Image (cartoon, rainbow, N blue to C red):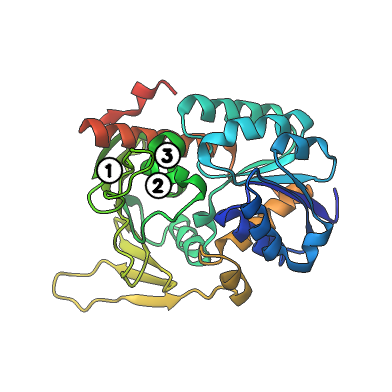
Amino acid sequence: MVDVVRYGLVGTGLMANEHLRNLAITPGAVVTALSDPVESSLATAKQTLGAAADKVATFDNGAALAKSGLVDAVIVASPNHTHRKVLEPFFDVGLAILCEKPLATTLEDARWVADRAAETKAPFWTAMEYRYMPPVEEFIEQLRAGRIGALKMLSIREHRFPFLKKVNDWNRFSRNSGGTMVEKCCHFFDMMRLITGSEAVRVYCSGAMDVNHRDERYNGETPDIIDNSYTTVDFANGVRAMLDLSMFAEGAENQEEITAVGDKARLDVLIPEGALVFSPRVGLREPKQVERNVIEVDAAALKAGTHHGSTFYEHQKFNAAVRGVGPVEVTAEDGFAAVAIGIAAEISAREKRCVEMTELRL
C-alpha cells in the first residue's frame, strides 16, 4: 500500500485533460509522466498541469513510459483503436491501469485485454464515468433498495451534441472508434448491465447517420458514424431496456434521462438537472404522488470535468484500488461486455435485423 500514487497518461487529448484536472484535486495523486506522439496535445496537457508540468516527464510512446519506472498507475486515453497495442507494455510491467472506454474496437481485441487483465495482480479498471454521477448513483441505490418493486423496463435517453473534433479526426470513422454504438453507447450498455444485474441475450438497433458530418470529407472519404438510433436490449432475466440516442439535440434541457419502471413505481434521473423523480402507482383517478429531489454534486468536481462530476468520484475509487484499500468496481470483463453489446447494435443497425448475442460467440 502506498500513500502517494504516481500517474502516467498515454494520450493527452480532451478526455486526458479532464483526467488531469480531476487528478489535481484527488488526494494522494501526482502526475509524473505523459505520453503522446502529437506535440500540440502534449503542450495542451502541460497547460492544464500548470506549474506542476515542470516536474513531469514526456514520452512520444507508451512503451517508453512503461519502462521509465516513473509511475505506479497509468491512464490510457489514446484513440480507441490503439488500446490493445498501448496496453501491452503496461501489462508486461504489472502497472495499475485505468483504460478509457471503450475497452477496444473489436471483440478480438477486447477479449485479449480482458484475458490479460485477468492474469495480472495489479488493478485494471475500465473507465465508465457515467456510473459515478452522484444523481445516477443515488438512482441505482434506490432501485437496489426495491423502491420501485421488481424492475421490468429500463430506458435511457441521451440527446446531446455531435462528436467533437479529435486529432486527425480519427473519431469520424467506425474502423477507428468501433462505431457510435461502441464508442459512445458502451457507457449506457454498461449501465444497463449494472442496473438489471443480467446479461444481454439479443439486441435490435435502428440507426443511421442522418444529420451530422454528411458534408465532411477526409482524403475523399465520408464519415460513417451513426448520429441517431433506437436500441432495444433483451436481458436474460426478462428485463428489457432501450437506448434513445440523438447527437443533434444539444438544445435539450437535460442531456441524459434514465427511467426505470417496476411493478410498484417509476423512478427517473435527469442530468444535468440532477433531479430524481419518484412516481408510485396510484388508482386511475387518484391524485398523483410524485416526489422530486435534487442530488447535489461537489462544486469542485463539477468544475473539473464535463461528466457531471463523475470523473472526480471515479478517481477517488480507482486511487483507493491502486493503494490496496478498495476494490476494482469496473473490470475488464465489464468493459468487454459493453463492447459486445455495442458491436451487436452496430451489426443490427447496418444489417437491419435483430442480433442474438450467441452470434458473436463470446
Q: CA distance from mark 1 to mark 2?
A: 12 Å
Q: Amino acid at mark 1?
A: Thr
Q: Dot 2: within a 10 Å radius of its alpha carbon, few (fewer than 14), some, or many (20 or more) residues?
A: many
Q: Which mark is residue 232?
A: 1
Instruction: Name the side, left or right, on which 326 lies relative to 77.
Output: right
Q: CA distance from mark 1 to mark 3?
A: 15 Å
Q: Which mark is residue 118?
A: none
**Residue indicated by mark 2:** 185
User: Which one is earlier in the sequence, the residue at label 1 or at label 3?
Assistant: 3
Callouts 1 and 2 close, C-beta under 8 Å:
no
Q: Nearer the viewer, mark 3 or mark 2?
A: 2
- Where residue 298 appears, as percent x and y from the top left, is 60, 74
- Where residue 67 appears, as percent x and y from the top left, is 81, 35
Q: Amino acid at mark 3?
A: Ser
Residue 251 showing in the rendered view: yes
**Residue indicated by mark 3:** 198
